[in-house]
Image (spheres, grey):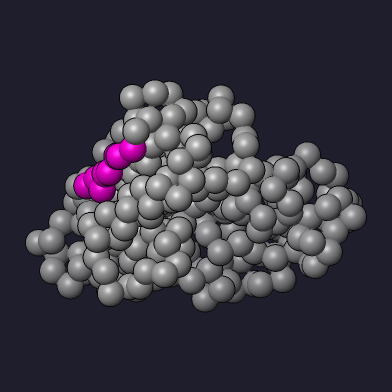
Amino acid sequence: MKSPALAALFLAAIALISCQNNSAKGQQSTGLNFSTATLERQDGPGCDTEGGACVRLEMVYPLADEAKGPLAARINDSIRHAMSQVLITLNPEESDSKNLEQLADQFVASYKSFLAEAPDYVLGWSIEMGHEIHLNSSKIASIELMISSFTGGAHPVGYSNTFNFLLPSGELLLLDKMMTNRAGFMQLAEKEFKLTRGLPETANLQEEGYFFGEPFSLPSNFVFTAEGLYIIYNVYEAGAYALGPTEYLIPYEKLEGLLNLDNIL
């Protein structure tokens, strides 16, 4: 299992970011109003003991002001659906027909059922989720969910899930649709990837152990910030677990002529 110190550091970072969601960076006066909600559960014989047999669930998530009607509903439904998928993935027999509260209860019930079958099991299960609103303007709400889960195995699983909602439609922004010079953008993104990884610009990423022998590709997750485009490769997206995640910012000035930024700036 991953070092407890590293796991604690990851969860501390989630907690810190969640507390910062109402900062000037995350909440701009021209954007939507967001509140914070929490889905929480805890149960098991070892909850009073550090590292004991306990199931813990704490998912802190943003909610758009429902006064915005269909726009808020579209955003909130997308966030809740993503949370449901986290819980369903860890309980594959469950389905989308259950609401978040029911799925949370089932996660706890699954752990208790497992303990009944394996009473000598001493490890806990956990799901932790925080969030950050990277950009909240009159044109876009750019949101990142950060998830960490452990249900046994060699190490916890940590990853990000992002949403870029165009306003006022609530439509999800696709990076491919923004490209005005795809070849130029891909070249820049690969260059910045190598720089972040401490590799020379001439390095062959496949030979360095990235992308599993395949050509350089973009990840599924990205957000826009006040400074630029923030790209997020989750663990396993660009290489083996030991390589960890890769995240980097491309400033807006470098994106001129490569992306259509009319929906952002």
Viewer-nearest residue: 102 or 145 = 102
- Residue 115 lies, with reference to residue 263, above or below; the image says above
Query: Which quadrant, please, contains the C terminus?
Result: bottom left
Viewer-nearest residue: 33 or 162 = 162
Please give the name of the residue rendered at 53% of the width and 59% of the height, measured from the top-left corner.
Answer: 221
Query: Which quadrant, please, contains the N terminus?
Result: top right
How many marks the image carries: the answer is 0
Q: Is residue 163 visible?
A: no
Please give the name of the residue rendered at 26% of the width and 44% of the height, measured from the top-left corner.
Answer: 40
Question: On the picture, is 55 further left or further right than 208?
Answer: left
Viewer-nearest residue: 111 or 154 = 111
The percent coordinates of residue 152 (x first, y second) are: 54, 45
The percent coordinates of residue 175 (x first, y second) are: 53, 68
Magenta run includes residue 159: no
Question: On the picture, is 196 further left or further right than 101?
Answer: right
The percent coordinates of residue 93 (x first, y second) are: 41, 70
Please give the name of the residue rendered at 33% of the width and 24% of the height, measured from the top-left corner.
Answer: 48
The image quadrant that residue 119 belongs to is top left
Question: On the picture, is 107 further left or further right than 238?
Answer: left
Q: Residue furthest left?
A: 67
Q: Is residue 89 visible?
A: yes
The percent coordinates of residue 202 (x first, y second) are: 89, 52
Question: On the picture, is 112 further left or further right than 122?
Answer: left
Viewer-nearest residue: 44 or 234 = 44
The image quadrant that residue 169 belongs to is bottom left
Majority SS type along the magenta span: strand
Q: Which segment is the magenta one?
A: 37-44
